[in-house]
Amino acid sequence: MPLEEAIGVQSTYELFVASAGAFGDKPALRFLESADPDDETIVWTYAELLANIRGTANMLHGLGVGPGDAVSILMPACLEYHLALWGGEAAGIVNPLNPLLAEDKLVELMLASKTKVLIAWRDETEGNYWQKALAAAAQVEGLEAVLRVGPRPPGGTLPKDFAKDVFGFQELLAAQPDDRLVSGRRILPGDTAAYFHTGGTTGSPKLAMHTHGNQVFTAWASVKMLGISDQ
């Protein structure tokens, strides 16, 4: 059977549309906010995940992100990371950043990808994400907006000379339609989905391009190799 017939979808966005159609009310993600296994687990169904991915893509589209624009992500593992990653791929090109990298390396990667929007974690008690994000963002020409994920910052925390627009991720997301892609974009397998940076073992990290076809094939091959089913 030709690979195109075996897989049947062309983009990561279509994967989530198909998954929501097949398993809409089943759990897609389980998230424990703390290290205590007795704490309540947050569960998103496939239908909820798709709706939030669409909302995120529409939010980024509203900020001017198109198929050739990069959205950088500087966050820990959290539910919103999935929205930034997959919603970002539905709107443009995602550029995940390693928060352990030095500020100058983050700037290099955002400049190389021509980042238009940065999505960053806003919790100053964890990992220094926000301070790194603001320091790096201030040096990236062409970056138009920073989206804050997490607690609302107290007043006056932005540097006085910070010239980028800063928005609350959750606040903007809540105002978006989640039943369609407002852009009407048709994503093709050859479209660039993401830039993942290399480890930098022989110098500065470099961007490695993933297409939607690459990522869809990886997902399909993983299911086949591991024998994953819906049971």
Image (cartoon, rainbow, N blue to C red):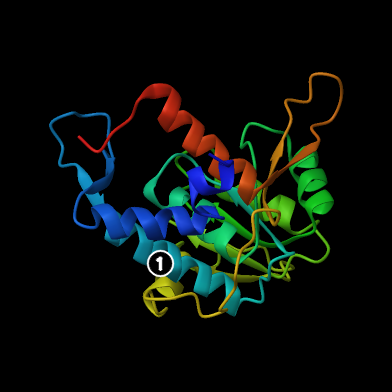
Instruction: Point out the residue furthest to the right here.
Output: 203
Residue 15 locus on image (x, y percent) = 45, 53
Type of amino acid at the residue the image marks with label 1: Gln
Q: Which residue is drawn at 82% across and 44% down?
A: 108
Q: Relative to residue 101, is residue 73 depicted above or below?
A: below
Task: State the SS at label 1.
Answer: helix
- Is residue 183 found left or right of 79 in the rendered image? right
Left or right: where 103 falls relative to 187: right
Residue 46 located left or right of residue 87: left
Q: Can residue 96 be seen in this view?
A: no
The quarter of the displayed image where residue 225 is located: top left
Residue 41 picture location, percent across and down? 19, 42
Against 7, residue 71 (above or below) is below
- Toward the top, the furthest residue is 201
Residue at horizontal 74%, vertical 30%? 198
Vertical relation: 43 (above or below) 199: below
Question: Tag 1: Cα neighbours inside 10 Å, few (<14), some, or many (≥20)?
Answer: some
Q: What is the x, y in percent for residue 184?
A: 56, 78
In the rendered image, which residue does mark 1 sit on?
170
Percent x, y of residue 46: 29, 54
Judge by depth and name the residue closer to the eye, 37 or 90: 90
Quadrant of the rendering where the C terminus is positioned: top left
